[in-house]
Image: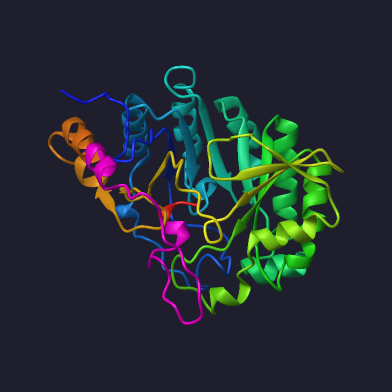
Amino acid sequence: MTCSEPLVDAFKRRISYLRLSVTDRCDLRCSYCMPERMTFLPKKEVLSLEELHKLALAFIERGITKIRLTGGEPLVRRDVIELVQALGRKLGDGLDELTLTTNGTRLEEFAGDLFEAGVRRVNVSLDTMDGQLFEELSRRDRLVQVLRGIAEAKRAGLQVKINTVALKGINQSEIPFLVEWAGTHGHDMTLIEVMPLGEVDGERVDHYLPLPAVRDELEERFTLTDIDDDTGGPARYVRVGETGGRLGFITPLTNNFCATCNRIRVTATGQLYACLGGAEKVDLRAALRSDSPDANLAVALDEAMRIKPEKHDFRIEEGAAPAQPRHMSMTGG
């Protein structure tokens, strides 16, 4: 007999938001995310689409109402639209929202399919509108593809939110332009502090840009008004008076956002990480592939609630090891 009680952690937080990675692979190599010569997981270690679907259904049964598909880059996973379509059939039947985070390189191809499957919002990672800088950051010349993808997503009816990692001395001077561009094109935007996850080429601290300082700079140009909007994630939002756009700030270093955390992450290999910045995990793949998958999944999810920490402890300083050795692409962005 399986358990259908809601997921509630030891700190009485109701867990309703699952970030489910479908692959660790990506067609970009963003310098703050992974080394240029990244080694990806053997395909045999990655959950099948059928296993990912079964896992998602188990979470919905336990009160998960929002699922975000992530990677790596989710749209490079072969036949991933079949999973999106299957999960889309649960909308209105336990699932309130199905969305995904993408780098946008394949969005032009799949935007229509995503909308037809029930997706209404997508997050697109975009750190610069400068072609040369985009190529330097991502180690690929794909900016035109990304911008076409964003435009096609809008045409298809998808609401697009732009995610931008704030990088000192790299895209810092471009942030006001990005804020204006996003707002005038009807896109929400979220700025994110660089996160110390996984070894990368160079020192992250060299490019760490505290977002309170960024907000101060933006307020010299824009009128920013705090608003109480909640999209289910950790961002705190303001309204930009000059564009009417909504701008979010995700501050894992300067102001951790853990008190109201409602999220868990599952990697493409079925490892459930109870906290982005922690090592606490349970192995859902083992449960899925056991003789009693339903019962063992229920036990594993209960264990995840027991071990979920109160908060993460990100630090960034010269010479320091990353908070966790795994890269963001492995955890699920």
The extreme bottom residue here reads 319
Write the residue at 49% across / 28% down.
Answer: 85
Image quarter where the N terminus lies is: top left
Q: Quick check: 126 left or right of 82?
A: right
Q: Which residue is drawn at 77% across and 64% down?
A: 131
In the rendered image, residue 310 lying in the magenta stretch gets the answer: yes
Image side of residue 5 versus residue 66, left or right: left
Whether the magenta-drawn stretch holds residue 297 is answered as no
Residue at 40%, 52% in the rendered image: 311
Is residue 185 visible in this depiction of the protein?
A: yes
Bounds of the magenta segment:
301-330
* On screen, residue 55 above or below 204: above
> Foreground: 272 or 25?
272
| Tally of numbered tags | 0
Using the rendered view, name the quadrant where residue 297 is placed. top left
Is residue 104 visible from the viewing direction of this image? Answer: no
Q: In this view, does 185 lie to the left or right of 88?
A: right
Closer to us: 156 or 306:
306
- Residue 36, image x, y percentages: 53, 73
- 26 versus 229 height, above or below: below
Q: Where is residue 248 in the image (x, y as percent from the top left)?
A: 66, 46
Q: Which residue lies furthest to the top in this view?
A: 93
Q: Main secondary structure of the magenta part?
A: loop
Residue 316 locus on image (x, y percent):
50, 71
Q: In which quarter of the image is residue 167?
A: bottom right
Identify the colour scheme used. rainbow
| Residue 229 x %, y % | 64, 34
